[in-house]
Amino acid sequence: MKTFIFDLDGVLVFTDKFHYQAWKKMADRLGIYFDEEINNRLRGVSRMESLEIILEKSTKKYSDEEKNDLAEEKNNYYRELLKSMTPEDVEPAVRRTLAELRGRGHKLAIGSSSKNTKFILRQTALMDEFDAISDGTNIIKSKPDPEVFLKAAFFVGDRPENCIVVEDAYAGIDAAKAGGMLAAGIGDAEHYEKTDYPLKKFEDILQIPNV
């Protein structure tokens, strides 16, 4: 049996709009130009790395303490927006596919850089679907470093080479491959050259050979 490690945002749920709105609110307050094109550069990277990208447009230099305050400000905006999420924000096909994978005996884990992972899982009633959760609260390095996925494998007691990572971002696919895992790509990552299993839709996971 395989272990499936799922990225959260863009794979199981979609909170891109909330991230954008929260970063935009912070950037507007600081008078820093921010648009959806810049926002696309933030996909799959950590909060602090995202902040650094946004601050490229700033004429002011910020101290580490100020940067930490800005990251916390953005996260507070974001968490307020997340409170509107419900179980209805998870597609029925996602729940059916997870149930089928579990029924076939596979282990399921989360591998997300977000520190809000558990909050989102609780809001959407997904928490009980997974054997382990590796997220931004237990890692030092963000994707494309494989740490978050390697810890997910460790938490479920499986070897990296027996794991399949499901990701929508190039950085996530890079992280999976760096960790010695197979990678299934959905969304933007479907056509990435490093993707082992391109997925047009989430339930295509069930068509992966030997799954």
Image (tube, grey):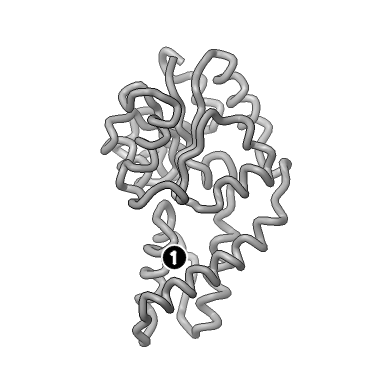
The residue sitting at 61% across, 67% down in the picture is 77
Judged left or right of residue 193, residue 2 is right
How many callouts does the rendering have?
1
- x then y, percent, for residue 25: 58, 74
Disc 1: CA contacts within 10 A as few (<14), some (14-19) or many (>=20): few
Q: Position of residue 156 (x, y in %)?
A: 45, 27
The secondary element bearing badge 1 is classed as helix
Task: Tell me which residue sits at (55%, 64%) in the image.
Answer: 75
Front in this rendered view, residue 120 or 69: 69
Q: Is residue 81 above or below residue 140?
A: below
Task: Identify residue for label 1.
Answer: 37
Left or right: 181, with 74 as reference point: left
Mark 1: which amino acid? Answer: Glu
The residue at 66%/61% (across/down) is 81
Q: In the picture, residue 54 is in which quadrant?
A: bottom left
In the rendered structure, the answer to whether residue 136 lies left or right of residue 173 reads right
Quadrant for residue 28, please give it.
bottom right
Observer-nearest of 34 and 154: 154
Residue 93 location, x and y as percent? 64, 30
Compared with 152, 32 (above or below) is below
- Residue 121 position in % (x across, y down): 62, 42
> Could you tell me which quadrant the N terminus lies in?
top left
Q: Quadrant of residue 126?
A: top right
